[in-house]
Amino acid sequence: MENYIIEMLHITKEFPGIKANDDITLKLKKGEIHALLGENGAGKSTLMSVLFGLYQPEKGEIKKNGEVVQINGPKDANELGIGMVHQHFKLVEIFTVLENIILGVEPNRMGFLQKKEARDKVIALSEKYGLQVDPDAYIEKISVGMQQRVEILKMLYRDNDILIFDEPTAVLTPQEIDELMEIMRGFSKEGKSILFITHKLNEIMSVADRCTVLRKGKYIGTVDIKETNKEELSRMMVGRDVNFVVDKKEQEAGEVILSVDQVTVASKISKKNSVSDVSFKVRAGEIVCLAGIDGNGQTELVSAITGLDKINQGEVLLCGKNITKAPIRVRSKTGMSHIPEDRHKHGLVLDYSLEENTVLQRYFEPVFQKKGFIKKPQVRTYCETLSGQFDVRSGQGPVTIVRTMSGGNQQKAILARELDKKHELLVAVQPTRGLDVGAIEFVHKQLVATRDAGKAVLLVSLELDEVLNVSDRILVMYEGEIVGEFKSNEVTPQELGLYMSGAKRNNTKENSYAKK
């Protein structure tokens, strides 16, 4: 008989209009890395939230080391040694790294906070596990990769031995993903048990011992990783074969849609510029990808192009019109669609309904309003149509509050809105972040279809496979500059890696292209 450290037996969890978990059983062995795989909205995060005490199930029970336990909240979970890194980090942005790590378990003597003791423990843990962070840095000033390290250190600081990672690599660079995989292997060797939610089959094949698959809230099966492959896992997950190769024909690029000329953007956290004298063009009928390790200016450059941040020097032209200082609505009406990097901060109003979010940039058009009053039937019909086309799943349909939807379905809602809106340029930043393989296949087809329809696409991606498979042209950014330009079919991942790390440069080539 197997000894399991955690058993979730016949768990059922319901929300209005949807059964998120339908009689699911999941068993975790001590010291194993157990992957939890499923489509967006399959119930993975809900199941882990039940284990962490954020939700109470309608049916079922949880056992730890064979004993039934009651987990009424995260405090109970922590006392049982269960920690969780959430898909959207639970950090206080105006607090320091150290303050976030010790929040709720602050060491004190006679009511006085013992920060030095806490600092020493955090530094020791970060050195032991290779999770170097600056304890005094503010969360709002550090990268998402660093923020994830803070979340992991929060678990380790509380001496958790059952670690839940919910989509831990969705916002990480390839290098950070490799580091995280090594850290997880180290935890496993120490005897810690890991539950690992992901959509990325390569990661599961690389690091997991077993994998449990959910589909539409139901348990499909648990497999030993050594006895399966990516194709079988994807079939279990989506119920059909998935094409991992992007079907894309060669075509000639047309007129210039986006022109970025000598753009410089100042850094918000240092005296050095985030973007320095960057020039490039994106033409109709092509997909141009900005590639690079996170933190090398891509975010700031896209924010400047889309109007989220101001440009200190240079200019941006869209369809021949100077939009350097134009408001976001003017950019939108000129022909720009934008899938933002941070879907919560810049993509959605989380406490609005799905239908309201669907028309965020179009509610003022005659089709959706009359004399300042929203035409609610038309908005609802439009939302239902888009949801069907893009497979956006929600418990209560158009009236669902977006905050309650899964991360993947929130992303699909943004994709639906931006792709359906009339545009000449699509700026897509991490468009497949947090999506399952079936949804990624669909998004890649939509990007290629946008290109084939004669539109321009500016893609920003940290996924090398996506960069190479979807792009026509690749611009590599390093330390705020474009250091190389390639056709996607003429460069290898290894060559790209050298440019992304700053080991090679080819500014002359890019500059000559930009001046054409």
Image (cartoon, rainbow, N blue to C red):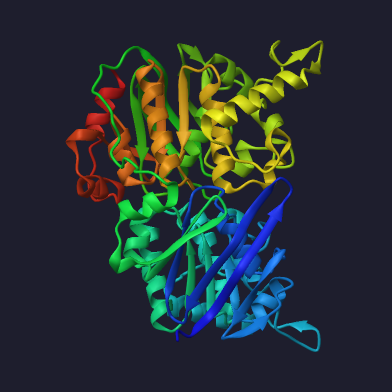
Above or below 51: residue 31: below
Q: Position of residue 149 (x, y in %)?
A: 51, 66
Q: Position of residue 104 (x, y in %)?
A: 72, 74
Question: Is residue 143 among the parts visible in the rendering?
Answer: no
**Relative horizontal placement of residue 244, taking residue 18 as reference (left or right):** left
Above or below 236: residue 387: above
Residue appearing at x 61%, y 58% in the figure: 22
Q: Nearer the viewer, residue 90 or 508?
A: 90
Q: Position of residue 105 (x, y in %)?
A: 70, 78
Question: Is residue 236 among the parts visible in the rendering?
Answer: yes
Above or below 106: residue 432: above
Q: Kindly indicate the quadrant of the structure image that contains residue 368.
A: top right
Residue appearing at x 64%, y 22% in the figure: 382
**Relative horizontal placement of residue 472, taking residue 46 as reference (left or right):** left
User: Quadrant of the image for the C terminus?
Assistant: top left
Residue appearing at x 67%, y 59% in the figure: 13
Residue appearing at x 51%, y 47% in the figure: 271
Residue sitting farthest toward the left = 490
Q: Kindly indicate the quadrant of the structure image that contains residue 89.
A: bottom right
User: Quadrant of the image for the N terminus?
Assistant: bottom left
